[in-house]
Amino acid sequence: MTAIPAKTTLIALCAILFLSACGGRMGSLFGGGDDRAVAQAEAVRDREEMTGSSGSVWDLFSRRDDPSTVLSVNRYIWTASLEVLDFLPIETVDPFSGVITTGFGTPPGGGRPYRATIAVTDAALDARSLNVALVSRNGPASAETVRAVENAILTRARQIRIRELGL
């Protein structure tokens, strides 16, 4: 039998110490130094119990919202958007999120086709509740055109509200 050289024994001992340090247990291996790690683990466990989540990456893919929750959109702005932009072919309509997407269409008396995406983001009859994005075949529409469409939608929404409430 041959004796194991001292160099091999020293390398093996260093490898064992290195691997034990990777586990975060080096302080407890030689006594002390583990109090902070225990306190951090208890804090994480307490936070998980309070929030009900483990804080893992998989939480991004889980849906914790109540499926019966519906976003509120202003029905006057919604209806006015459909009426004002009735010359545009509708591609998608989602009344729950408040998004209307249209295809390209030419406005009456106009020569340039536009495509619109309308987002009604709030239940208030307010300009902040309406977001309009207009695109022509050459790129985004001018700010004046977008503002004119927004004003037309808001004016029509107020007219619908006045008519329905009998004011």
Image: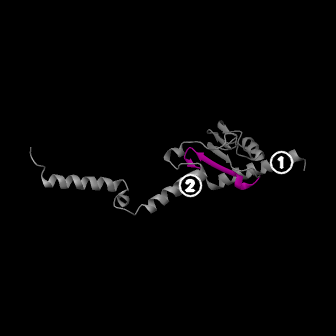
- Nearer to the camera, 97 or 158: 97
Side (left or right) of 58 relative to 91: left
- Nearer to the camera, 75 or 162: 75
144 w.r.t. 101: above or below = below
Tell me the residue at 54%/45% (across/down): 59
Q: Which residue is mark 2?
A: 46
Tell me the residue at 66%/46% (across/down): 118
Image coordinates of residue 14 in percent, x first then y, are 24, 56
Q: Which residue is mark 1?
A: 161
**Few, some or many residues within 10 Å of mark 1 (<14, 14–19, 20+):** some
User: Which label sits in the foreground, 1 or 2?
Assistant: 2
Quadrant including the N terminus: top left
Tell me the residue at 78%/48% (across/down): 157
162 in magenta: no
Q: Residue furthest left?
A: 2
Image coordinates of residue 119 in percent, x first then y, are 66, 47
Side (left or right) of 112 relative to 95: left
* Label 1 to label 2: alpha-carbon separation: 51 Å
The amino acid beneath tag 1 is Arg
Q: Secondary structure at mark 1?
A: helix
| Quarter-of-image position of residue 83 | top right
Image coordinates of residue 126 in percent, x first then y, are 75, 54
- Nearer to the camera, 117 or 165: 165
7 w.r.t. 86: above or below = below
127 in magenta: yes
Tell me the residue at 59%/42% (across/down): 63
Image coordinates of residue 54 in percent, x first then y, are 53, 48
138 w.r.t. 42: above or below = above
Color scheme of the displayed model: one colour
The amino acid beneath tag 2 is Asp
Residue bounds of the magenta highlight: 125-140
Side (left or right) of 73 relative to 143: right
